[in-house]
Amino acid sequence: MALSATALIDLTQAKNYLRVDTASSLHVDAEYVGVGTEGGEDEFPLIGNKVPISGSLKLYVENVLQDEDTNFSIASYTITFKAGSVPGDGDIITASYDYTATVDTFESYDDLLIEDLIEAATKKAEDYVGRAFVQREITETHIGDNKQVLRLYKRPVVDVDTITIGGESLTSWSERLSIGRVYHLVVWPEDYEIVVVYTAGYGADRAATQALVPDAVTAVLIAVATWYENRLGVKSQNISGVGSIDYGDPDDLPEASKKKIGSLRVNVC
């Protein structure tokens, strides 16, 4: 499956947010680095020659945190202890740090899952705020109510292309695109099927749209991450001695996402 052109974020952005792509950071916790020797060895390479991300390394000798300025220095993946701080014979050296992954940490089937979640999160976010993010042509059906005003479901409306009433083309109408309203010159005939084709959305493509609605981008990322981490659809979890976690309705947009895009929500009155 390939992402649709109207998905608000792409696979790389989602995986960066989830920290599962080739450029993401992995964490090493309590790695055994080596042991002090009677001869006072002062250089120790990290296992696998992994290069810590700057500022992430925490080095311990016998569980005592060492200071990089005072006790040691690091060049690439090699730690060098300074004079007066060389581990004693038998002292255990451990480290925790972040490093950049060199291969994708997840399989291709995860890509398909994440793409599905991106599509779902984009649609949920659009439905919640009553807007289209990436510009596209929309065809929607209404039923006439004998009133003059017809409210389109998505904003911002760029243009109304065609309107048909009971299969017959309407040639003249008035419109207020800024609020997504279309006005019949008389009334929309009651119980008739009205089909409106219009263009709505912010930017012509994903990149342009992201620059215009950054809060929506964050909302979609949050939703993807929440659903990815809760793939079983658990609504809540109680951990003895720790507390409870409320995940909310797994079929709904997460509350954190709603908060990010609340200001975009259309007043439908």
Image (cartoon, helix red, strand yellow):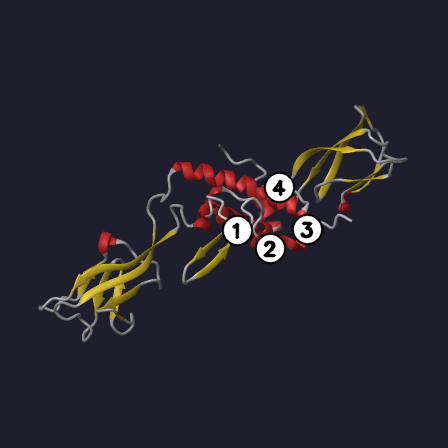
Q: Secondary structure at mark 3?
A: loop
Where does residue 208 sit, x and y in percent of width and height? 60, 45
Give me the residue at 59% from left, 38% from top. 6
Q: Which residue is mark 2?
A: 260
Q: Nearer the viewer, residue 241 or 34?
A: 241
Do callouts 2 and 1 mark residues in contact (Cβ within 8 Å)?
yes
Residue 105 at x, y = what percent? 36, 45
Residue placed most toward the observer, 159 or 147? 147
At horizontal 68% and vertical 51% (from top left) the residue drawn is 265
Q: Which residue is mark 1?
A: 222
Give the side of residue 39 with respect to residue 48, left or right. Answer: left
Residue 40 as seen in the image, left or right of residue 67:
left
Query: Residue 145, percent across and down?
Result: 84, 36
Q: Is residue 114 left or right of residue 40?
A: right
* Residue holding disc 4: 134
Q: Which three-letter amino acid code belongs to the residue tagged 2?
A: Lys
Q: Are marks 3 and 1 in contact (CB under 8 Å)?
A: no
Of mark 4 and mark 2, the one earlier in the sequence is: 4
Disc 2 crowd, CA 10 A, few/some/many (<14, 14-19, 20+) = some
- The secondary element bearing badge 2 is classed as helix
Give the spatial CA distance, label 3 vs label 2: 10 Å
| Crowd around label 1: few <14 · some 14–19 · many ≥20 (10 Å) | many
Q: Are marks 4 and 2 in contact (CB under 8 Å)?
A: no
The residue carrying mark 3 is 265
Tag 4 secondary structure:
loop
Cα separation between marks 4 and 1: 19 Å
Choose the circle earlier in sequence order: 3 or 2.
Answer: 2
